[in-house]
Amino acid sequence: MEYLSFLLALLPIAWLIFSLVVLKLPAHKTCTATLVVTLAIAVFGKWQMPALEAASAAAEGGVLALWPIMIVIIAAVFTYNLSTQTGSMNVITKMLSGITTDRRLLVLIVAWGFGGFLEGVAGYGTAVAIPASILAAMGFAPMHAAVICLVANTVPTAFGAIGIPISTMASVTGIPVEVVSYLTAFQLSTFIVLITFLVVGLVDGFKGLKGVVGACLVSGFSFALPQLYVAKYMGAELPCLVGSICSMAATIAYTRMVHRSTAAEAEEVVTAKSKFLAWVPYMLILTFIVLCSNLFPAIKEVVGSLKSVITIYGDKPFTIKWVATPGVLIILATYIGGMIQGVSFAEITKVLANTAKQLTKSAITVVAIVALAKVMSYSGMINTTALVIAELTGSFYPFISPMVGALGTFVTGSDTSSNVLFGQLQMQVAAKIGVDQAWLVSASAAGATAGKMISPQSIAIATAATGITGSEGRIMNKTIVICCGYVLILGTLVYGLIPYLHVIY
């Protein structure tokens, strides 16, 4: 009976993948249909979730999807749209071309380095939406830009939004945050270097690696080593932030020294004032987000006090932060930046309204998928799935552990949510099979990063940012193969290193 429940719990996930990858149905349609199916299974299946509870769980997911998730997507695309309208994006493109016109190197700088930085300070989709829109503006095919940025935004998500996923995992499991932080960074270190080769390979195939192997190594190791050091000695807040800054700086310096011939010859001189004005919205975005992060607790506390606490599901409080959320900060920064550039308040508001209208289908997709995730979580469907997987694999479970984390991110769209869902489960299974608990907990956190590239929520962000809403299935068709390889390699590493844990820490 438990195995029948397992298959029933897997049905929404299996249908979601099948309908997107094989049938290539539009995400906003299939995600809505899958939500209805999930509600029916939760209410009438083994879990017997009361209909009112199921509806309130979906409602909580819908509110969460709109605020803060959807507001981030709207904000990021709004910034891009305004930059395009003012001509700032053309200036930014010329500046980046002044470093290099080699698309392979641009991917390392924009998608990997800058994207990693955005993930480190903000998360919530900004690291996909903004770099993808910049790459599209620089002439990358929208589908190409979306896939590249989804793949690049895997490893950095473990320590995204100033370390929230790892801090949350430590809180859920009771394992010291320094331990989870270090072990997760250790498990991901190899992937940081591998991903640089992979995103470059996505540009022109792996034959395109010729001539840029050195740049990939510089970009990868300059991210991996600082991140590992900071994760071990400073905790979860800064590894991604420090690693991405080091990687960007090292990659740009290497490009200027070794690939200087790839820089575009300036057809016209871009003045310092034009450069400054073009980057003003993005500089303000980074400034606002950093000031309102854990790095400045006093400011964060003041801004974070502007909130509402409501109850949607049961007696569980749900907090809506009206200002201290990346989406609102990005919109505020873009308004101020736009007015500094000379655009009127009314014109900026018109761009924002048009952006919101442009993203209607993306909003339906995100609302449906987050609502679905909440129903599966609160009903116990996700827990049933994970427990049966653990039972079936037995002593080989460490090999599967990262896959469980990836499953959580696929369904919820969030590393943090995956860690909340499966942190305790990983602890219980580790104790049962006699494996170090911190190692398996960290494996789940590391595996969660793989699920990011196939999450319908993340893919919806990528398609919205590049203007190809409706192509979600084609994108998942490309990223799912990479995701499978990712978790298989990570699982092998996690399982194979168990005898050597006394050396690792």
Image (spheres, rainbow, N blue to C red):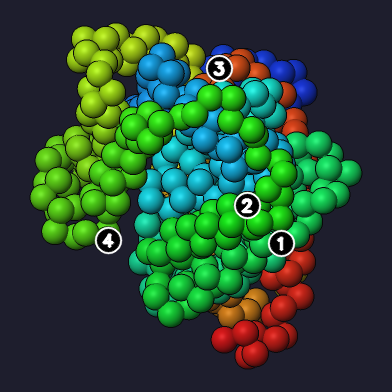
Residue at image x 62%, y 85%?
Answer: 504
Q: Which mark is residue 256?
A: 2
For the residues labelled 4 and 1, the Cα–Cα distance comes to: 30 Å
Q: Quadrant of residue 61?
A: top left
Amino acid tagged 3: Gly
Disc ID at residue 295: 4
Q: Secondary structure at mark 4?
A: loop
The three-letter amino acid code for the residue at tag 2 is Arg
Q: Real-space Cα distance between discs 3 and 1?
A: 32 Å
Of the image marks 2 and 3, the number of the one nearer the N terminus: 2
Q: Earlier in the sequence, mark 3 or mark 1?
A: 1
Q: Residue at x 56, y 68 (%)?
A: 185
Decide which of 42, 273 is in the foreground and name it.
273
Q: Are marks 4 and 1 in contact (CB under 8 Å)?
A: no
Observer-nearest residue: 166 or 286? 286
Disc 2 crowd rating (10 Å Cα; few below 14, some 14-19, many 20+) is: some
Q: Which of the labelled discs sits on residue 217, or is there none?
A: 1
Report, in whole angstroms, how far the alpha carbon at label 2 lies from the one at label 3.
32 Å
Identify the disc placed on residue 467.
3
Tag 2 near tag 3, CB within 8 Å: no
Q: Nearer the viewer, mark 4 or mark 1?
A: 1
Q: Amino acid at mark 4?
A: Leu
Give the secondary structure at mark 1.
Answer: helix
Badge 3 marks a residue whose secondary structure is loop
Label 1 crowd bin: few (<14), some (14–19), many (20+), radius 10 Å = some
Image height of 208 relative to 397, above or below: above
- 118 relative to 317 in the view: left or right: right
In terms of sequence position, does the residue under pointer 4 or pointer 1 come before the other?
Answer: 1
Residue 139 in the image: state x and y as whole percent.
65, 23
The Cα atoms of the two marked residues, 3 and 4, are separated by: 34 Å
